[in-house]
Amino acid sequence: MIVGNFNYHQILFALDTFKLNDEKLGYLEKINSELDRVIKCFEAPKALPLKMYASDNINIDDSCKELKEYIKKQFEIISTNPYDKRYPGEGELRGLVRSELINYKKLRTIVNDEINNIIEKIKSEAAKVTPEKEDFFTPKKVTPSHIAKLIKNNPQRKIVWENSIGELIDMVKILIILELYPGLNEKKISAFICEHFVNPSKEKYQLNQIDKVYKMLQNTLWKNNKNNTTKFFQ
């Protein structure tokens, strides 16, 4: 469907170039706004003869470029003979403008249907996304056995760790040594901490952050046997 400068097939083609529904919606709403503007122009009562709206020398308040181009076109297509001076009369022009107005309204209805379809898609996608519920708690004790019990009983909740990362790594190492958490080993320490613990600001620990501290402890405290993990048994 082609109406004035609007081609529905080109509009559909342009839609395919957008990946996100929000982008498609924005594009269609802009098209719809332009159609509203043209329809308002075509619908407005015309006090002057329509042939005057095609003049390049007259600026008329209730006109628009689409109306001007459309009326000009009617004068151009009345006859292919350059010596034929017949022009459409006022009544014929008004009938043609009404017909074109109907075409614009049909195109606007089609565009509105596309807009409504995309809005429904956006709502449907939003309904499928369930926000993750972050549940935090601060343990009363930080002994390895108590921490292991908390994680087993509350696997979805994050433990707020109020001590240093180094002390947290020490505590997890004791979980491994005492086999308090099945399947946990040295290679999984960083991932285990990121999954079950957050810092005092309730922010998730970063994997590279844990790895960095872990390597530092390996090269300093643990290497020199200065590990101070006995406090977790107190």
Image (cartoon, grey):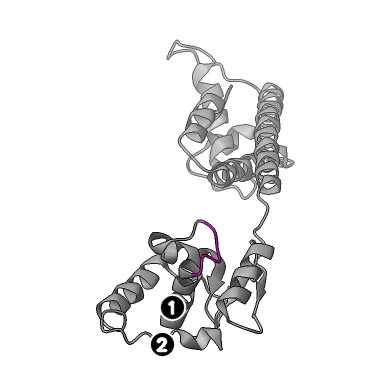
Find the distance from the CA under tag 2 to the CA under tag 1. 8 Å
Is residue 154 visible to the viewer in this orientation of the structure? no
Question: What label sits on residue 185 in the rendered view?
Answer: none
Q: In this view, does 172 lie above or below 39?
A: below
Position of residue 36 measured from the top left corner of the image (x, y, whole percent): 66, 42
Identify the secondary structure beneath mark 1.
Answer: helix
Q: Name the residue under label 2.
A: 228
* Mark 2 crowd level (few <14, some 14–19, many ≥20, 10 Å Cα): few
Q: Nearer the viewer, residue 5 or 85?
A: 5
Residue 228 among magenta residues? no
Give above or below for 31 relative to 179: above
Q: Residue 170 carries which label?
A: 1
Q: Residue at x 61, y 45 (%)?
A: 29
| Residue 77 seen by the camera | yes
In contact (CB < 8 Å): disc 2 and disc 1: yes
Q: Which residue lies furthest to the front in this view?
A: 178
Examine the rendered structure and indicate whether residue 97 appears above or below residue 193.
Answer: above
Q: Residue furthest right?
A: 45
Q: In which quarter of the image is the C terminus?
A: bottom right
**Picture coordinates of residue 141, whole percent (x, y):** 63, 84
Point out the tag, 2 or 1, that comes first from the N-terminus. Answer: 1
| Residue 53 as seen in the image, left or right of residue 76 | right
Q: Residue at x 26, y 84 (%)?
A: 224
Q: Magenta segment: does it hold 179?
A: yes
**Residue type at numbered disc 1:** Asp
Give the residue at x 59% y 40%. 28
Residue under the point 53% across and 63% down: 195
Q: Position of residue 21 (x, y in %)?
A: 57, 42
Task: State the extent of the magenta-drawn residues as a range.
Answer: 178-182
Depth order, front residue of 58/66? 66
Query: Within 10 angstroms of label 1, few (less than 14), some, or many (20 or more) residues?
Result: many
- Amino acid type at circle 2 is Asn
